[in-house]
Amino acid sequence: MNSNRTRTKAFFFGGLFVFLWIQRPVSTAESLNRVIATVGTLSISELDLDDAAEKYNRLQKHLKHEDMRKSLRTRILDFLIDRAIVDVVAEEESIQVNEQRVDSEIEKRMEVMGTTSRKQFEKAMESSSGMPFELWVTELPYQIKKGQLLQLKIAVPPPSEQEIRSWYNQNKDKVGFEIRYRIIAVAPENDSVQEENKIYKEVSEIRKSVLADPSSFSLIAGSPRNDPALRSRRGMVEWISSFDLYKYSKITATIAAPLPNGGLSEVFRDERKRYCILKIEGKRPTPMDNLRGGIQNILYRDKEEETFHKWLKEARTEIPIQIFDEAYKKENKIPTKEENFNVD
């Protein structure tokens, strides 16, 4: 009898253990799949929020309109809501971005850059975007949709004459002059600390010799030690507006800006990881009209960002959005009975 009771008890507890073991991952899965918001016909789950956390953290410095007073959870959910709005409206406008469309966009950008090297293109994108290429690629579908919506639905006002003049006056120390300069640029053979230190010391010694004999700059700039693209013309870069130089190399433009005619820079490292020194051979003011088109483009891009952000806020009041996340509703003061999302 006792043996039967023991077997029955063991069977009962064993079955209970199996039941609880099976139920636990199911409960966890249900929690992750819990819908915390809907945007139109799209839903956002707890799992979506978890998956977006790493990407949001990596993109955060590139997001211009973040309210850092809000909790991280709220900011990530807002990030997902904004992107869901773009997806919903893009679908309404028949904007499709598949893998082929992304590949086509990359090919088009490579053609504009005049390169057939994927590796060179990836480095250029990392330099211009300030983010790793693999992250830039994951952002590309969103940026394509955003660009299409800006063309189709969102009217961006052109910059006014006053805005152009104001930008020029505020930035003319950086982009308001033309220069003629020579440059010596030496690239390390690898990324090792030893190689970097070696090249830095070498270029520092070159600078000392040029300070002692300024006329030697052009001779050294024409030697095999200089970058091959520069040595044929003895390091000379003919008259270029600082605005165009700024577009080509922000670092070089920033180094050149305070130097007087005849001035010699300290050793600096440019975007291509070359150790450089430059000597100003001539400097003169650049008329604003010579820069007008470039200034308009910069201001237009800024206005695009502002206009797009304003459109997103307006779209939140037009697209049905429901919030089921209690922490978000409490932080944003959304009444429990009113789940429609009507706050900024």
Image (tube, grey):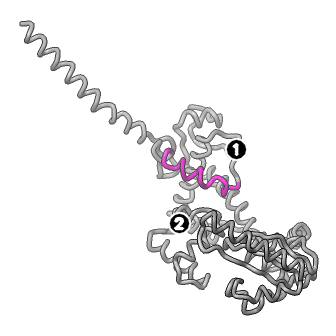
Q: Would you name the residue on which mark 1 appears?
A: 68
Q: Residues within 10 Å of mark 1 (few under 14, many from 20)?
A: few
Q: Would you name the residue on which mark 2 appears?
A: 137
In the picture, measured across the screen, residue 206 lies left or right of residue 9, that is: right
Q: Amino acid at mark 2?
A: Val
The magenta stretch spans residue 95: no
* Above-or-below relation of 25 to 264: above
Could you tell which of marks 2 and 1 lies nearer the N-terminus?
A: 1
Q: Position of residue 54 (x, y in %)?
A: 54, 49
User: Which segment did they paint magenta?
Assistant: 50-64
CB-based contact (under 8 Å), mark 2 and mark 1: no
Q: Nearer the viewer, residue 13 or 146?
A: 13
Say which element carries label 1.
loop
Dividing the picture into quadrants, the one containing residue 259 is: bottom right
Q: Position of residue 331 (x, y in %)?
A: 64, 34
Q: Residue at x 55, y 50 (%)?
A: 80
Q: Residue at x 71, y 40 (%)?
A: 69
Say which element carries label 2.
helix
Q: Position of residue 81 (x, y in %)?
A: 57, 50
The magenta stretch spans residue 58: yes
Q: Residues within 10 Å of mark 2 (few under 14, many from 20)?
A: some
Whole-number angstrom distance, CA of label 2 to CA of label 1: 26 Å
In the picture, measured across the screen, residue 269 lies left or right of residue 2, that is: right
Provide the major secondary structure of the magenta segment: helix
Q: Residue at x 65, y 34 (%)?
A: 333
Q: Quadrant of the N terminus?
A: top left
Q: Nearer the viewer, residue 242 or 304?
A: 242
Q: Amino acid at mark 1?
A: Met
